């Protein structure tokens, strides 16, 4: 379901824009429709009032919680059933401020999926092994936030779950529009994550709600990036950073560069030097995220000491750097793992051909 289609349905029942906004706002905020200062019988048109219970039931049926997997770090992985039997994952990020010396995760947030599966095929990602199954509608994306709000307060939404948001751009932007105007989420706390697609840099500056941007960098070498992200647009890392910097300066939101740390692949001194060369002085932050191991894949995370050394070196070189834990590591929390286990518990995932570690 798309939010635009839902708006048309409400209008057909006599809703004016203020009626649409009220219904959608209370849904996005996970609030009952009968609440608020204005009673329904004194505010909404009769035809809409009569149909509203059925619409609410339909919205509630867009996603259902299949299982919840709580992790020691305070995060929780959610396996979510969609109305057609497909499944996606969402992540409740840790709700409280982390203890001293504990690697930070964004607090009071939720990470949502934008597709069932993914076509990018990152060689280290479980989600991409099965390819793209289908797009999520914008209402299905927002429904994950609504589900999360029934479990915890949410003041940040990260579009960084299953799928490549740029490949479902219209629906993701529609979800961002609602969350940023009626869903109580500050624009800077809506984070659009992408491997880097020219359409993103064209579309985002034109939006009323301009989200923060997270770019999956993973390496400073163009040939290695093509191997790690085989079906991503062929952006040279330097060009990707230039495009990100232009958006950061236009919006005031620093670019978050995502770097999945894989031992022997992108944890070398050459990469540290490359990051410093590309990002020093930029309106940007580097997120170093040690790899979350996946059964059947050859990749491993480097030692925490090595990851911390990289972060310290980048700080000294003028790059704002955060060393993050991937949420839910102790509950098989790598993106796509819960869905894969539920769909085929005994299935081994084939390894993509890629450069061997250290090559």
Image (spheres, rainbow, N blue to C red):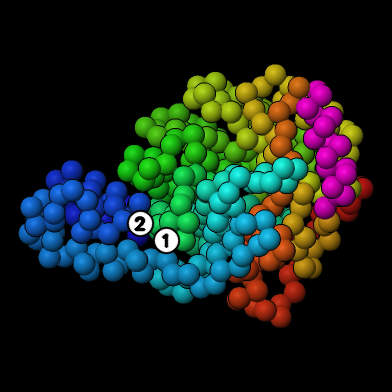
Where does residue 181 sit, x and y in percent of width and height?
A: 34, 39
Q: Residues within 10 Å of mark 2 (few under 14, many from 20)?
A: some
**What is the quadrant of the N terminus in the image?**
bottom left
Q: Secondary structure at mark 1?
A: loop
Q: Secondary structure at mark 2?
A: loop
Q: Residues within 10 Å of mark 1 (few under 14, many from 20)?
A: few
| Magenta region | 301-317
In the image, is 308 to the left or to the right of 47? right
Where does residue 135 sit, x and y in percent of width and height?
A: 47, 58
Mark 1 — residue?
Answer: 150
Could you tell me which residue is drawn at 32 percent across and 43 percent down?
182
In the image, farthest residue toward the right: 358
Placement of 288 over or under 263, stated as above or below: above
Asked whether residue 232 appears in the rendered view, the answer is no
Placement of 10 over or under 80, stated as above or below: above
Mark 2 — residue?
Answer: 30
């Amino acid at each position: 379901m798309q939010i635009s289609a839902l708006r048309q349905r409400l209008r057909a029942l006599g809703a004016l824009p203020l009626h649409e906004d009220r219904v959608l706002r209370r849904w996005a905020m996970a609030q009952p429709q009968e609440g608020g200062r204005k009673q329904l019988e004194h505010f909404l048109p009769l035809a809409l009032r009569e149909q509203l219970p059925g619409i609410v039931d339909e919205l509630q049926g867009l996603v259902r919680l299949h299982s919840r997997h709580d992790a020691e770090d305070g995060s929780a992985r959610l396996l979510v059933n969609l109305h057609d039997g497909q499944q996606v994952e969402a992540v409740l990020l840790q709700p409280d401020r982390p203890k001293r010396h504990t690697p930070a995760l964004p607090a009071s947030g939720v990470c949502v999926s934008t597709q069932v599966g993914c076509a990018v095929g990152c060689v280290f990602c479980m989600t991409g092994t099965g390819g793209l199954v289908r797009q999520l509608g914008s209402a299905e994306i927002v429904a994950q936030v609504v589900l999360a709000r029934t479990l915890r307060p949410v003041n940040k939404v990260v579009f960084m779950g299953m799928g490549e948001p740029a490949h479902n751009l219209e629906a993701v932007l529609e979800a961002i529009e609602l969350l940023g105007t009626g869903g109580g989420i500050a624009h800077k706390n809506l984070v659009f994550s992408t491997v880097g697609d020219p359409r993103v840099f064209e579309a985002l500056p034109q939006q009323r709600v301009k989200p923060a941007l997270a770019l999956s960098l993973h390496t400073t070498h163009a040939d290695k990036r093509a191997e790690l992200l085989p079906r991503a647009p062929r952006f040279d890392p330097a060009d990707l950073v230039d495009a990100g910097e232009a958006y950061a300066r236009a919006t005031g939101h620093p670019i978050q560069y995502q770097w999945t740390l894989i031992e022997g692949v992108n944890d070398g001194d050459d990469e540290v030097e490359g990051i410093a060369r590309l990002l020093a002085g930029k309106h940007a932050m580097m997120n170093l995220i040690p790899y979350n191991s996946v059964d059947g894949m050859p990749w491993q995370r480097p030692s925490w000491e090595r990851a911390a050394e990289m972060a310290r070196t980048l700080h000294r070189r003028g790059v704002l750097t955060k060393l993050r834990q991937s949420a839910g590591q102790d509950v098989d929390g790598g993106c796509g793992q819960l869905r894969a286990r539920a769909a085929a518990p005994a299935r081994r995932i084939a390894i993509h051909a890629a450069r061997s570690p250290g090559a």
